[in-house]
Amino acid sequence: MVQKDSYITEGSPYGIYKLRVEGLNLYYGTKQALKDISIKIAPNTVTAFIGPSGCGKSTFLRCFNRMNDLIENVTITGSVMVDDIDIYKNMIDVYQYRKKIGMVFQKPNPFPKSIFENVAFGLRINGESSKSVLQGIVESALRQAALWEEVKDNLNKSALTLSGGQQQRLCIARAIAVKPSVLLMDEPASSLDPISTAKIEELIYQLKDQFTIVIVTHNMQQAARVSDKTAFFYLGELIEFDKTDKIFTNPSKEATQNYITGRFG
Amino acid sequence: MNRIRIRSEKVIEWIMILCSLVSVLTTIGIILVLSVDAFKFFKEVPFVDFLTDTQWTPLFEDKHFGIMPLLSGTLLTTTIAILLAVPVGITIAVFLNEYASKKFTSVVKPLLEVLAAVPTVVYGFFALQFVTPLLQKVIPGLAGFNALSPGIVMGIMIIPYITSLSEDALRAVPKSLREAAYGLGANRFQTAFKVIVPAANSGIVVSVILAISRALGETMIVAIAAGQQPRLTFNPLESVETITTYIVQVSMGDVPQDSLEYRTIFAAGITLFAFTFLLNNISFWMRKKYQHRYE
Ligand SMILES: Nc1ncnc2c1ncn2[C@@H]1O[C@H](COP(=O)(O)OP(=O)(O)OP(=O)(O)O)[C@@H](O)[C@H]1O
Ligand SMILES: [Mg+2]
């Protein structure tokens, strides 16, 4: 279903990568959760992070929008460059920066507000208050998230009345309404039924045109279906990062082979 | 062995039932005592007069039995207290929850709770001897007894009630909502006041209602510092009398029991009871309605 890209540039000069991580280490207290990770991710691609539970996928994903700042006692060394700017250098305004990075979480987490206000939230905190501007953006975000048809008559209803799958698409709409350039998704479909999952996967494919997408998933088929490249993590290390079909048909590391064939994890 | 255990569990069950019966019976007893004498009172004083007369002078020659002056005194001091305590109490709760370090919170929260443990008679003299003179320097013409000073002190007293319960409500808001807000680029202030506080609003409202009940029923502070002149006014600079103060005044005085004068305190008491009963029911209903929202 998903056509694999040919335009992912290999070994290109700096500047054309959206995300570039070099020598990243992360410690929770004294426990090291990420070990010397380096990776380069091209714009407008979908990258899947796979690996057994506890290997650090979520931790790594959360480095891209500095979500780990919320946890006490986290130490990070190395560099995370987004558009060639090191986001862990103190000059950046982290709140302003996060607006460029959308995040979708494992469990749908809509605010206990109306559907409309959920999607409008990011715009409102930016100071946008014009009703017509908000309406326009809310509609287009909901359309992009393939939810518009289902909710257009109930925009003032509480978001908590939606089904799990609808809530997750609402969270995607909420994230893309602020027009980020990167979309981080941490197991976005793991709590959903197969039909909702298929909708989300379809959506990811659609959204690739506008966003650089990184998705954590435990579902191998899902990784194979939606992603251009796949990164395999094990015990805090990045074991292998390559084109998705290569990872799934002919991985170069034995650990990857064992994992994708279900021999552990 | 097993039979002993079953037997002892039965005994414990009965003890618990007895204990809860004590509190239920006490409540019923209070209502009964209040209603019996209030009923006798309303046989002599028309209920309409009680509600509409603008004077309360049961102890004077020219007797009037309008509850409004006492009610206005009660509502005035309570309103002042709430106007102070709600913004301060909620702000402290948000600060402790969103901004302060865990260490700071662990020091400040017990300190705050000391405020609630100070005997109210101490607060009363604090209002009369310290706050009133202080206010008189700023507001010339402020009476020695006034509604403002005890209102403010009562507000200080109920801050911990609001802070403590609101902080619990704020802490119960799922971490995922906080992450969602930060993920969208909200700063701490926006996250706190646009997401966390609204999500905790039912718990915060409950804390405010309980604080209102506490202020309505507060006796010592107002008895000492607000004066004892029933006056239908909403001017905080004047001296007022609250329902509770009146009840103390009469029950400590030399009014003969089983007289109409004495029964006024039951009519006043049942009015106060009606208010707090209503408030408690609202808070009970709110808690029930919103309890399962995040489960
Ligand atoms: N807040 C935290 N404090 C301390 N240790 C943590 C914290 N969060 C995660 N860890 C630890 O860091 C390691 C990586 O966790 P992480 O959540 O990133 O794994 P994951 O690959 O996303 O796992 P899963 O597939 O189960 O979601 C784990 O050993 C975990 O116990
Ligand atoms: Mg995870």
Image (cartoon, coloured by chain):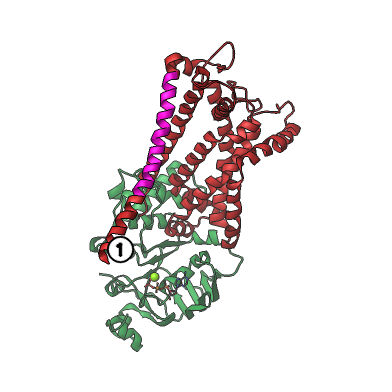
Chain colours: A green, B red
Decide whether the magenta segment is chiefly helix, strand or loop: helix
In the rendered image, residue A136, in percent from the top left (x then y), is placed at 40, 47
Which corner quadrant of the image does residue A255 belong to? bottom left
Residue B217 sits above or below residue A247 on the image? above
In the rendered image, residue A143, in percent from the top left (x then y), is placed at 33, 53
Quadrant for the C terminus of chain A in the image: bottom left
Tell me the crowding category of disc 1: few under 14, some 14 to 19, or many 20 or more residues within 10 angstroms, Cα based: some
Quadrant for the N terminus of chain A in the image: bottom left
The residue positioned farthest toward the left in the image shown: A195
> Residue at point 59% right, 11% down?
B61
Q: Mark 1 points at which residue?
A: A191
Q: Is residue A142 left or right of residue B222?
A: left
In the rendered image, residue A167, in percent from the top left (x then y), is placed at 33, 55
Q: As shown in the figure, which amino acid type bears the numbered disc 1?
A: Ser
Residue A114 seen in this snapshot:
no
Q: How many marks?
A: 1
Residue B67 seen in this snapshot:
yes
Q: Give the range drawn in magenta.
A: B16-40
Identify the subunit bearing mark 1.
Answer: A
> Residue at point 36% right, 61% down?
A107
